[in-house]
């Protein structure tokens, strides 16, 4: 077994690899960029080497710096994780040439699977069923069009060098083909430096089924069953599970055997994944599952396979890289229960899934699940890398148990002020197609809007938090009248009066001027809000400094007590506003003169409107 290992990656996967290495007594070396100087993987490793500025192309993607770091620390081997340099055959070769052990397949296996056309051709020769289509030997637009016509629409144009869901165009009708081809080739040239394309039949009701395979240096290959990764957003996986819903034993045997055949055809060593696409219009059928591509590395979603097989795939990788045989034979592997993984991202589903960066002031997830993460509370989510902050994995005896456990853990998550997709994931887990296990890759494209969580908490949740805040003995609430009934709250800066049960008075409860309670975080169905008890009466905070008195919330002006040019004394009533069933009197913050007056009785005003300006007396 290896004695030392450098991990050429960051975030959750670096932490994941360190965990197994440590258990096996292997010394670990982390590498890090400027942005990651205080990252969890750096703190967890035995040693860490700084490899450059924050952008990945100046640090995590610079092979020479990583090899130098391994040499400098005496690390024997390099584990690339996923992404970054993990499928870069030249880097793998450079690691080997430097006299180090590469934890991954041989460079020629990576190359064989690197281009989609060559990989498909190789698979066809090996007798692995591939998606019907044309491999693009002749790249003339006329010929490609003729091939598409012969395949029958819809078709998918794919860049042969494509990856990460890029460089693909669906074409539904012959007249759209030429334009789609031009734009696909343009994107392929700029993203991958290779504009060649292939054409595939576009599979309807497509499900993404993939098989985990493992090979060793003795030429043995086994599979560790399938995963279903059909829940995707823009061809990127959102949730993964194992086994695949609706997969019968015969179909499983056929697809897993095809995967082993595919891996053997490229002399495969280490962890790999064979991705298939299935036409599930009539369920999963062995004659409707086709090879799509091979990923020659450990996948993001490997934990679901670990959960159902009880194997540690990183340990397998390290043993195989050390020259040991595979830890288990095929007949020693079996499926135990069901596992589902959700990818938790720092992003805002309500804003088009915009990445959300900043400090994770609060970061908590529910219990009873496996959490693979690279961050802890207080960490910074930086703009430089993938915004995935954790993978949450539930394992149960049956699918429904795993589904409910995962939904509960996400439901209870608290992430603040960074936004997360937890609420979106909870809703996805509750979608009828997910519950039924019939998700196809188009689900989010069709129904995504319905999965966007609401902007505000439910009335019940607000009532609960209002009641709880009002009952804090030291919260500083002053009862205007008993029994209590309403509290003024600012929820993510949006001001509102919240009624809560247990009373029947219409009089609101306001926070005392001198003792405003601390804000609290309210979390519901995976969403988190900051709730700040809000003081509406008396001198409004906006008035304190500059004498600009603004409307604290939308409402109607019911009285104006001053005229322009008048002198006022501190605390004198200026304007009274009616909003949310109560009156708010705005008073002068200091002695002075009214220099601006924009308030007329009866007028409706929105929040933040400048009503009065007081200029301080000399
Ligand atoms: P990439 O290498 O960019 O990830 P893939 O070839 O793995 O591209 O395809 C990514 C996703 O695109 C698949 O998971 C599937 O959802 C969809 N897809 C790929 N090929 C087809 C096809 N022939 N028909 C329908 N959908 C497809």
Image: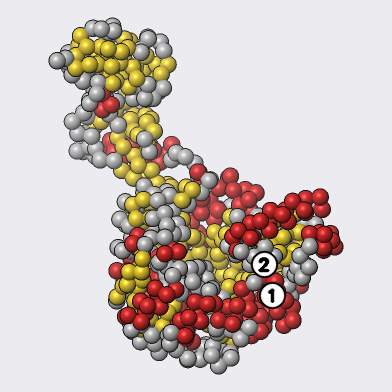
Residue 303's label in the rendered image is none
- The C terminus lies in quadrant: top left
Q: Is residue 1 left or right of residue 407?
A: left
Picture quadrant where residue 154 is located = bottom right
Is residue 68 something that shows in the picture?
Answer: yes
Q: CA distance from mark 1 to mark 2?
A: 8 Å
Q: Mark 1: which secondary structure?
A: helix
Residue most extreme to the bottom: 218
Percent x, y for residue 84? 48, 68
Q: Residues within 10 Å of mark 2 (few under 14, many from 20)?
A: many
- Total numbered labels: 2
Picture quadrant where residue 486 is located = top left
Percent x, y for residue 400? 55, 62
Task: Indicate if the residue with disc 2 has its beta carbon within 8 Å of ligand 1.
Answer: no
Q: Residue at x 25, y 7 (%)?
A: 565
Percent x, y for residue 15? 38, 70
**Nearer the observer, 408 or 1:** 1
| Residue marked by disc 1 | 118
Q: Are marks 1 and 2 in contact (CB under 8 Å)?
A: yes
Q: Earlier in the sequence, mark 1 or mark 2?
A: 1
Q: Is residue 12 above or below residue 6?
A: above
Q: Residue at x 47, y 40 (%)?
A: 455
């Amino acid at each position: 077994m290896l004695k030392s290992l450098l991990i050429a990656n960051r975030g959750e996967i670096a932490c994941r690899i360190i965990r197994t290495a440590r258990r096996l007594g292997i010394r670990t070396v982390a590498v890090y960029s400027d942005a990651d100087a205080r990252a969890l993987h750096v703190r967890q490793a035995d040693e860490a080497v700084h490899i450059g500025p924050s952008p990945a192309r100046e640090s995590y993607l610079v092979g020479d710096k990583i090899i130098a770091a391994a040499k400098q620390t005496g690390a024997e081997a390099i584990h690339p994780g996923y992404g970054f340099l993990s499928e870069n055959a030249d880097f793998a070769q450079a690691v080997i040439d430097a006299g180090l052990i590469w934890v991954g397949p041989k460079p020629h296996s990576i190359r064989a699977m690197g281009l989609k056309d060559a990989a498909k051709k190789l698979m066809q020769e090996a007798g692995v069923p591939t998606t019907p289509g044309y491999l693009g030997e002749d790249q003339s637009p006329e010929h490609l069009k003729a091939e598409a016509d012969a395949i029958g629409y819809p078709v998918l144009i794919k860049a042969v060098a494509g990856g990460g869901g890029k460089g693909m165009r669906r074409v539904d009708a012959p007249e759209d083909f030429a334009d789609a081809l031009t734009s696909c080739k343009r994107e392929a040239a700029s993203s991958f430096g290779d504009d060649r394309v292939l054409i595939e039949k576009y599979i309807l009701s497509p499900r993404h089924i993939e098989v985990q395979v493992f090979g060793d240096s003795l030429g043995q290959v086994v599979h560790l069953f399938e995963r279903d990764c059909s829940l995707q957003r823009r061809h990127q996986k959102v949730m993964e599970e194992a086994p695949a819903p609706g997969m019968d034993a015969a179909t499983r045997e056929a697809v897993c055997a095809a995967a082993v055949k595919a891996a053997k055809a490229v002399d495969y060593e280490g962890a790999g994944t064979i991705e298939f696409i299935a036409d599930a219009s009539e369920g999963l059928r062995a004659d409707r599952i086709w090879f799509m591509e091979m990923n020659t590395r450990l996948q993001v979603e490997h934990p679901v396979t670990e959960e159902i097989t009880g194997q540690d795939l990183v340990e397998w990788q390290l043993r195989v890289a050390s020259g040991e045989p595979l830890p288990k034979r095929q007949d020693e592997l079996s499926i135990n229960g069901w596992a589902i993984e959700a990818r938790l991202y720092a992003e805002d589903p309500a804003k088009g899934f915009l990445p959300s960066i900043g400090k994770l002031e609060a970061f908590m997830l529910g219990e009873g699940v496996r959490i693979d993460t690279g961050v802890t509370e207080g960490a910074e989510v930086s703009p430089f890398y993938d915004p995935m902050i954790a993978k949450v994995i539930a394992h149960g005896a049956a699918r429904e148990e795993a589904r409910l456990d995962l939904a509960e853990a996400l439901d209870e998550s608290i992430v603040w002020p960074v936004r997360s997709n937890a609420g979106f994931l909870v809703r996805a887990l509750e979608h009828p197609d997910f519950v039924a296990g019939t998700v196809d890759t188009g689900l989010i494209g069709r129904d995504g809007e319905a999965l966007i969580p609401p902007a505000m908490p439910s009335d019940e949740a607000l009532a609960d938090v209002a009641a709880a805040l009002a009952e804090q003995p030291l919260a500083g609430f002053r009862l205007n009248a008993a029994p209590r009934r309403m509290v003024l709250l600012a929820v993510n800066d949006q001001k509102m009066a919240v009624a809560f049960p247990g009373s029947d008075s219409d009089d609101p409860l306001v926070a005392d001027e001198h003792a405003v309670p601390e804000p609290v975080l309210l979390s519901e169905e995976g969403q988190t809000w900051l709730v700040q008890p809000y003081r509406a009466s008396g001198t409004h905070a906006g008035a304190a400094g500059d004498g600009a008195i603004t409307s604290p919330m939308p409402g109607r002006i019911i009285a104006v007590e001053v005229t322009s040019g008048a002198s006022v004394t501190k605390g004198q009533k200026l304007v009274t506003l009616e909003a949310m069933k109560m009156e708010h009197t705005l008073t002068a913050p200091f002695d002075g003169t009214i220099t601006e007056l924009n308030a007329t009785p009866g007028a409706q005003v929105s929040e933040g409107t400048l009503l009065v300006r007081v200029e301080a007396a000399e």
